[in-house]
Image (spheres, helix red, strand yellow):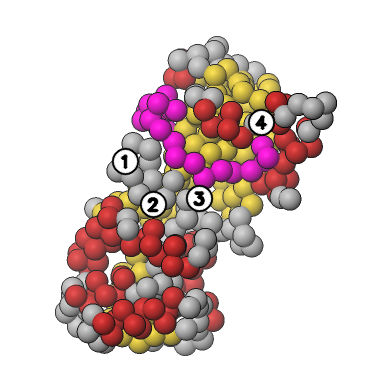
Amino acid sequence: MSEIELHRKLLGDKVRNDALHEALKRVIRPGMTVADIGAGTGFLSFLARQLGAAHCHLYEYSEALALARELARRNRITGLTFVQAHSGEVARPPKADVVISETLGNFALEEGLLETLVDARRFLKPGGTLLPCALRQLVAPVISPRLQQEIDVWAGVGHGLELAAAREIALNNMYVKTLRPEDLRGPDSARQWDEIDFRPPARPSSQRSGAATWSGPQLGGRTVYGFALWWEVDLVPGVTLSTSPYAPATHWEQVYLPLLEPVAAVSQDLELGLRSDTRRGVRLVWETALRRAGGKPRSLQRQDLARGRL
């Protein structure tokens, strides 16, 4: 995706923009300073200045910073310092009252949000405000075969070819897809598998793990083809942005994790374990099992994004 296409999507997302504006409105006071990390086109700094911030430092390593300068000039927005660098490379940053970084991905942590916000504390004055402040990651079983049929095409290729090796790679991947409410059992089928508080003094790890369980009755005896992932982020307390299929649509989509084989939890519990590591790119492992009450797990499936590379 080109840089301008990325920013077109961001700035065309009214749900996102309105939530960020409301969050800044709640914390910006006249005379405050702001550190805008991953500033892109400068949109958030422009809002902060409109809301009364005295000065904003914009940190951006890409060529978008030149566009931010031009947009600031054309909109007659002053009180800005432009720093062409990755925030992690800035040795002694000036301290700010508010530090904001909107570096969320479809999979919430894929763009280094956690690592960026942990490092961003170096930019924050004691008692200052960090945006966003908290994140919750959620998962729900997908009971519609629609997305699985789009992905698992290998057996139908025909012409006498055996493509199991290609199938294994494909099904060890995560897919950015738009999940529809009818693809899921309902809002009550969602489970929170991870929660992160970005605010000091918490020190969240880049290695995340969690689990979720559904009983057969909770799934209505339906076949499960994969899992949907989405997130909720608290920009500030009381202002939440969500990529749930049941929330207003944003430019972000959900993530679909396919299963190797569909499973039906009738008189058993469906169990899912998730582990992610974002220290160097994204590593994601998902393990699925059926278990009778008090019994050993059956039908174990283990998938790993590392096996989906090609």
Please determine whether, in this image, residue 254 is positioned above or below residue 207.
Answer: above
Q: Which residue is mark 2?
A: 251
| Residue at 22% over, 60% down | 22
Disc 1 from disc 2: Cα separation? 12 Å
Q: Which residue is mark 3?
A: 107
Name the amino acid type tagged 4.
Val
User: Residue 18, image x and y in percent?
Assistant: 24, 58
The region drawn magenta spans 170-190
Disc 3 from disc 1: Cα separation? 16 Å
Q: Which residue is mark 4?
A: 153
User: Residue 242, image x and y in percent?
Assistant: 35, 47
Secondary element at tag 1: loop
Disc 1 from disc 4: Cα separation? 31 Å
Are discs 2 and 3 less than 8 Å apart at CB? Answer: no
| Residue at 40% over, 33% down | 180
Indicate yes or no whether the magenta region holds residue 169: no
User: Residue 182, image x and y in percent?
Assistant: 40, 26
Labels 3 and 1: the sequence-earlier one: 3
Labels 4 and 3: the sequence-earlier one: 3
| Residue at 62% over, 60% down | 281
Q: Which residue is mark 1?
A: 247
